[in-house]
Amino acid sequence: MKRLGLAIALAGGCASAHANLLLTAVFDGPLSGGVPKGVELYVLDDIADLSSYGLGSANNGGGSDGEEFTFPPISVSAGTYLYVASENDGFTAFFGFAPDFTSSAMSINGDDAIELFHNGTLFDLFGEPNADGTGTAWEYMDGWAYRATGSEPSAIFTTAQWSFSQPNALDGETVNNAETLIPIGSFADGGTGCGDCSNEPVAAFISAIQGTPDTQTSNSFGETDVSPMLDVRVVVEAVVVGDFQDSDSDTKRDLSGFYIQEETTDEDGDPASSEGVFVFDPDTTTDVNVGDRVKVVATVDQYFGETQLSSVESIEVVAQNQLGSVTAASVSLLSSDAVTLSGADRYQADLEAYEGMLVTLAEPVHIIEQFQLDRFNEIRVTAGDRPAQFSQLNTPDPAAYDAWLQQTAARGIVYDDGLNEQNAAIDMLAGFNPYAEATAPRMGDTAYELTGVMDYKWAGNGSSQSTWRLRAHTDDANTFIATNPRPAAAPQVNGNLRITSFNVLNLFKTLDNGASTALGHDPRGANNAEELTRQLQKTVNAIVSLDADVLGLVELENEFDPVNDGSTAIELLVNALNSRTGSNTFAYVYPGSQFVGTDAIAVGVIYKPAVVAIADGSIPVILDDTVAATLPIFADHDFVNDPLFDGPSTNRASLAVTFTHISGGDNFTVVVNHLKSKGSGDDLASDDPNADHMDGAGAWNQRRLDGARAVDAWLHTAPTGIADNDAIIMGDLNAYAAEAPLTFLLSNGYSNVESAESYSYVFDGQVGTLDYVLLSDSLYSKFEQAEIWHVNSDEADALDYNTDYGRSLTYYDGSTATRNSDHDPVLVGLRMDSAPVADPESLKLAFDTWIADGTLSGAGENPLARIDRAGYFSRLLAHIVDLNSEGRLNQACNKLAEADNRSDGMDTPRDTLEGVNMAALNRMINDVTAGLSCN
């Protein structure tokens, strides 16, 4: 706006002669039967006899039926809220208190008008009695509408006096939260005494409207950033920096309003005050465009934490093409650790000083979360490195975890489209158009100078609460660069036995269409045959690319059959694999019973019979509570009240199988596990060892730890009938690397082949390992290489097999393995044939090959030093070859010992080399040493 030098003064209109009662809310609820249905009214002035007022409803545009409910002859005081509902029980269950009155007149739907009468005459109105509200701006189907502060009764309905949820905004809700759902009891009269009856709005700068922490006030919802000019009628002149009006030509930006920002010359220079604000204009009073300088007369409002201009009286376009007169604010997400709480009571960066402004993020940001992409077209980005789960790298601790959450939140923000709709095309999100698997941004991809308006809203549903959202103001504002390229194929690992932990994303043969599984559970997988076909395509693509010999499967439908007649999910998978790769390439392990445990999902094992066979004299066995109760460490455990594997909220039963490696003859035992997840612990008492102690480990940590203890103790009993120390504990342990279940197993004879910095899962924008292949100490000596294939966790679930909620079928690519699950597979290579390599020439040849393909290199960061160290090692191995050929065995053995010391992974002396084949090289050195019979 142009500076007028006017003092800010409160101003308000005079109340009408009969403005004693006012409609302030209408609602159409989400409970069974569509309740609660009804209205809220606010008493503006004392009413001696309430019976002079009554209500009516106009259903489906059928016109007025007159006064259908008359209030009783009682007196009510100014400032009272009255609630009239269609019935009592649903209203009470949802709001937590009973309605003041019930009437069939309130048996309304979200397309019905409401009439308030005084002495039989209509004097306040919501909606249009002669119009069906479906599809109109005032529709409130399974939602609500709330009256703007300062409104007065009027027999002429105008949407400018109301705030609206989107239709279906209450879907799935069971109780009201006035801060995030229907804001009942929040209407403020704004003054009925005339005092100064001037109708002139106050000329104000946006910075004065927004205020600073020193001038902002609080409200009954606990918000502390409320405008110091709340409820004041103002006139503001500023530039449109974001056009999000409805009913205009731009269908990608419909938020019922637009954003305006002061010209650079009109900024107040205070970094604590915002220079932008959202104008709530659901009626599109005047069509505006980005760059228009406009004069707006409206009232300052606060809506779900956002300062707005609402109750718009007029909008005048003063000039066009003025965007150059505005300075986009540069926002650094790394310069401050300040946080506030979002509408979901989660930490968020404190960006109040930029509310409503056009901003550009100063640092490059990486995509860290896409869980809500296919529902709300929103992602989360962060400045700096992608955050790891706190307990991936740190021992769980409440204080440290809370500090971690704040630090992580301070450098992140939601990037959203311009709609508050569910299940819109992902193409609507700027930078994601056109959306298809081949070009879809992945987590870890980067945007530079991300630009848009800084918005504070929810996404139109309680599942995505109010928080800071950056929304692109133009279609071409932002681009995401593929800095985390999509892998074309699975990684390869050395060794002659390849093992993988593989999550099959609830692979069910029983369709989720109302049927039940053989165990009586609801299915969790594909809804129809088309989805199941799509799911199998992705899963088969992934398994074929991995080329693993033994696969521990997680999240498989819990049913097994000793005869492969295609009747179960695991049979369906094996048959699909064999159809692709050739008959009998894969087989499945029958666990000895129809079910593995009691849950809807189970673990399973498939394998290549050409590589391994179930060991003679062994049988596959299941670890459940009956077996666990026989273990000495659980002699005093109460399995009735604290089950470990059987029943709700327990670990899934584990499955153990002993295999023989056909070419090498070695036996080894795999145990596939799926420990209890971290959620669903809200009902636990705070002193329950399984409660979420807010230390980073989540709920049910003790149950997971007991599950790990049981697996370890069980393996010591040779449960399969084969006593062999070579064991693999694999699967989804639902524990990050520094949590108790993992640290227990690692301290009891098992090694983690993944580094602490690895990840196989992304949750809440943070990476970590949940999926493991842990090797017993004896088997670790045969370990060659491990890789995690990031084919799933970095991808949006919009790319998976699902077709529900109207998802575009073009997102899916059935020729790839991309997003076959939400967990990444862990692939491990082992060398099971133990015949030593007794040939120094073969050792030198392997070294040269690995140097050439980059799997070995000189250690260190200095390029010249790396070349020098690799050359030193090459000369050392060549010298060993010469010494051996000359018969100088003692000298060759001494040099082999030197090579061992320089490649054994110990700190002293430090290794000369580094790379993924370091373990393989050191093993070959020791094999040559053994072959030469060195002492």
Image (tube, grey):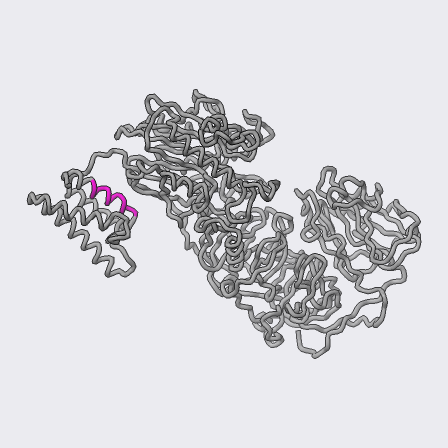
Count of marks placed on residues? 0
Q: Position of residue 110 (x, y in %)?
A: 75, 46
Give the answer, above or below, for where 603 lies relative to 241: above
Q: Residue at image x 42%, y 25%?
A: 621
In the image, what residue occupies the spot 66% across and 67% down? 210
- Left or right: 195 with respect to 302? right
The residue most toward the front is 636
Query: Residue 701 appears at what percent x and percent y?
Result: 51, 41
In the image, what residue occupies the spot 62% across and 40% down? 683
Q: Quadrant of residue 417?
A: bottom right
Residue 22 visible in the displayed image? no
- Quarter containing the C terminus: top left
In this rendering, position of residue 404 left or right of residue 827 = right
Quarter of the image for the N terminus: give it.
bottom right
The answer to whether 749 appears left or right of 208 in the picture is: left
Which is more toward the observer, 515 or 912? 912
Q: Position of residue 460 (x, y in %)?
A: 64, 51
Dominant SS in magenta: helix
- Of 666 and 638, nearer the camera is 638
Q: Magenta stretch containing residue 591, yes or no?
A: no
Please, is residue 292 above or below residue 540 in the view? below
Residue 809: x and y, percent?
52, 41
Answer whether residue 185 is visible to the viewer in this image.
Answer: yes
> Residue lying farthest left?
886
User: To which quarter of the image does residue 172 belong?
Assistant: top right
Choose between 808 and 870: the one closer to the eye.
870
Examine the rendered structure and indicate whether residue 897 appears above or below residue 449. Answer: above
Q: Which residues are magenta?
A: 916-926
